[in-house]
Image (spheres, grey):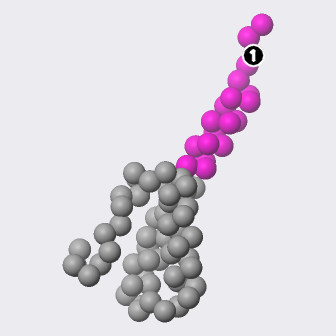
Amino acid sequence: MPEDEPAFPDIADLSYEAAREELIGIVAKLEAGQAPLEDSMQLWRRGEALAAHCATWLDGAQAEIEASTTAPTTS
């Protein structure tokens, strides 16, 4: 990675909340349209990865909820 590129934390280590907050920041930067194209593309790729990470967290939470609400009860 070139020296002028920001060092992003590893996405796999981020909690859902941290990934979501970073994604919100990236969306705001991209919507502002002030970043050069190369920086925008880097932000876009990071945002896509963050969105996938958040979706994985949410899918896991949904599966856990469904498993706990459909588990057979013992009498």
Residue 45, compared with residue 56, is above or below; it is: below
Asked whether, in this view, residue 46 is left or right of residue 51, the answer is left
User: Residue 4 location, x and y as percent?
Assistant: 26, 82
For the point 41% across and 92% down, which residue is it? 36
For the point 50% across and 66% down, which residue is it? 22
Q: Which residues are magenta?
A: 57-75
Residue 11, compared with residue 6, is above or below; it is: above
Q: Quadrant of the C terminus?
A: top right
Residue 22, compared with residue 34, is above or below; it is: above
User: Residue 65 location, x and y as percent?
Assistant: 68, 36
The kind of secondary structure element at disc 1 is loop
Question: Can you name the residue that lies furthest to the right here?
Answer: 75
For the point 53% across and 53% down, which residue is it? 16
For the point 68% across and 29% down, which residue is it? 68
Residue 52, visible in the rendered structure: no
Q: Amino acid at mark 1?
A: Thr
Q: Is residue 71 magenta?
A: yes
Residue denoted by label 1:
73
Residue 35, visible in the rendered structure: yes
| Label 1 CA crowd tier, 10 Å (few <14, some 14–19, many 20+) | few
Q: Is residue 45 magenta?
A: no
Total number of numbered labels?
1
Asked whether, in this view, residue 14 is left or right of residue 51, the answer is left
Q: Main secondary structure of the magenta part?
A: helix
Asked whether, in this view, residue 63 is left or right of residue 39, the answer is right
User: Residue 59 location, x and y as percent?
Assistant: 60, 48
Residue 25, compared with residue 16, is above or below; it is: below
Q: Quadrant of the N terminus?
A: bottom left
User: Residue 55 location, x and y as percent?
Assistant: 57, 55
Question: Can you name the residue that lies furthest to the top here?
Answer: 75
Asked whether, in this view, residue 30 is left or right of residue 61, the answer is left
